[in-house]
Image (spheres, helix red, strand yellow):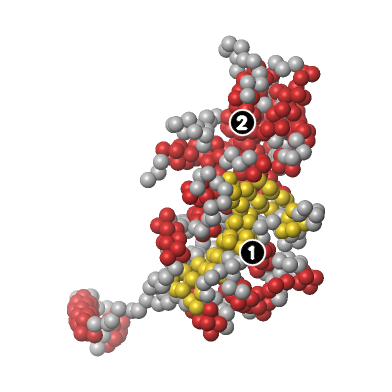
Amino acid sequence: MVTSREEQVRNVTNEIWAMANELRGNMDASEYRNYILGFMFYRYLSEHQEKYIADQELVEVEDDESINDAYRTIPGDEVNDYLEDISSTLGYAIAPEDTWATITQKVAESTIAPSDFQQMFDHFNENAKLNPNSERDFRGIFDDVNLGNSRLGNNTTSRAKSLTKIVELVDHFTYQDEEGHDILGDVYEYLIAEFAGNSGKKAGEFYTPHQVSKVLAKLVTIEMNNDKDFSVYDPAMGSGSLLLTVDGEVEKKNSNKTVNFYGQELNTTTYNLARMNLMMHDVEYQNMTLKNADSLEMDWPDGPDSQGIDHPRMFNAVVENPPYSAHWDNNENKLKDPRFKPYGALAPKTKADYSFLLHGLYHLKSDGTMAIILPHGVLFRGAKEGKIRQALIEKNQLDAVIGMPANLFYNTSIPTVILVLKKKRERKDILFIDASKNFEKGKNQNTLRDEDIDKIIKAYSERKDIDKFAHVATLDEIEENDFNLNIPRYVDTFEEEPPVDIKKVSQELQDINKKIKETESEFLSMVDELQVTDESKDIIEAIKEAFK
C-alpha cells in the first residue's frame, strides 16, 4: 500500500517534472537536469545551514524577524568568523548575501542581478576552502550548472530570467510530508529517475533502477556482522543511488549502525550528482569518501598504515552496476597488479566486465559480501574470461548466479545476471537462480515487483533446489560443465507440452470437414442462382470444377 509520504513525494515530483518540461524548451533533459538538481541542492544546503544557525543560536533574532534576516545583519568584519564556525561543523558555509532565502527574496522583488547567480557559486567554492577536511566534498560541486549556456538565452539578461524561473520552480514546494518530515531527498531521488527515463542510453551512466538496486542491497546485507560501523563501496557509483539503497537496508536491520560510504566515478558530472544525492539524504561529509577517477586505472581507495605505507581499504559490502563490456587498457603490466594477478589473466580489451568484478572483490573484507550485475556473457565466454571464471570458482569465491529479466535498464534491453561473491566461504557449491521470468512488463521498460524481489532473496537465503527456479550445484557438477555457468545448464525451466487427446483432435477435424462441405454447398447454390452470360459462363464452370 502506498503511504501518504510516498504519495506526496510522487505528487511533488510529478508537478516539478511537468513544470520543468515547460521551462526547458529545446534543452535536452539530461542537460536541464543539472540546473534543476543543482538549485535544489543549493536550497537544501542553505536551509540546512539556517537550521544550524537557529539550533546553535548564532544570531539574535528580533521580534517578527527571520533567521535569515538576522544573519544578514551581521557586521561585515564579523562575517568570516561566522563562516568559519559554520564550515567547521557543516563542512561548507554560505555567506549572508548568497543564502537561498536572500536569493528568493531578490527574485520576488525583481531586484536580482545576473551576476548574483555566478557570485553565489563562486563564493561557495571560496568558502569550501575554510575547512580542509571537507573541501574535496564541496568544492566544484556546482561546476555543471553552466550559467553561460546559450540554451538558457542569447544574452546575460535572458539567461538570468531563465535561472529566475528555475529558482521559482524549486522554491514553489515545501518538501515536507504531513508529519513535518523532510522529503526533499526523496523528491531528488525520484527526479533523478525521471531524468534517467528521458535520457535514453545516457541514463546507464548514472542510474540503476531502484528495484534492481534493492536486490543488490538486500543480498549484501543479509549476513551483516555485529560491528558498530558498516562500510559500503561502489567503484562505478553513478549518481550514488545504489549506495543509498544499501544504506536503507542497513537501517532496516540495525538503525544503530553508522554507514560509511565509499565510491568512485569517472564521469565528472555524474560524480557531482552523486555528491549532491548523498548529502541530500543527510549523509554527513565525514561519512562519505567519494572520488572522481577511473577505478580500473587508479586502484582506490587505499590509506597509509602506521609506517606511511598505503594499503587497500576493505569493505563490508561492495556493490556494482558497471558499464557493460566497456573498453579498457589491458596492458600486460597489469598482470602484476594485486587485483588481477591471482587470477592469471586480464579481461579482454573490449570487455572490462571481469576487471570491474576483480577490482571490487579485491576491496572486500574476508567476511563481506559483494554483488555485481553484468551481461550474461561473463557466464560462458571463453579465452581469458574463461580462465578468470575458472579461477574464481576454484578459489571458491563465487557464491551465487542470479539470472535477471530482460529490459530492466534504461540503456540496454539485454537480460543481465547478478553475481554474488565472498572471499572466504565454507560451502563448496554455487547457487543458481533463474528469475528471468519474474517481472511486470512495461511499455518501455520492465520492472521488478516486490514479490519478485522477495522470491529472489528468499531463494538465496534458504539455498535449496526449487523446481524451475533454483538449483544448488556442486563444484564437481560445475567442473563437469567445463566451468560454464550458463544458467539453463543448472536450472531446468523447460515446460512440457500438455498431452494431446487424439480422440478429441479427430472429432474436431471431422467437425471442421463437415463445416467446410456445408459452406461449399451453400456457395455452389449461390453460384447456380447467378445470371449466366456469355462472359461469365466459363468462370462459373471453372468454379464448380474447383469444388469437385
Can residue 192 be seen?
Answer: no
Residue 222, percent from left and from top: 49, 58
Q: Which residue is drawn at 45% across and 61% down?
A: 457
| Quadrant of the frame with the C terminus | bottom left
Q: Is residue 428 above or below residue 62?
A: below
Mark 1 or mark 2, whichever is nearer to me: 1
Residue matched to label 1: 361
Can residue 301 be seen?
Answer: yes
Q: Residue at x 63, y 24 (%)?
A: 56
Left/right placement of residue 445 relative to residue 534 reads right
Q: Is residue 132 above or below residue 484?
A: above
Could you say which quadrant of the image residue 449 lies in? bottom left
Crowding at label 2, few (<14), some or many (≥20) Cα neighbours within 10 Å? some
Query: Amino acid type of disc 1?
Result: Leu
* Residue closer to the observer: 511 or 409: 409
Could you say which quadrant of the image residue 161 lies in? top right
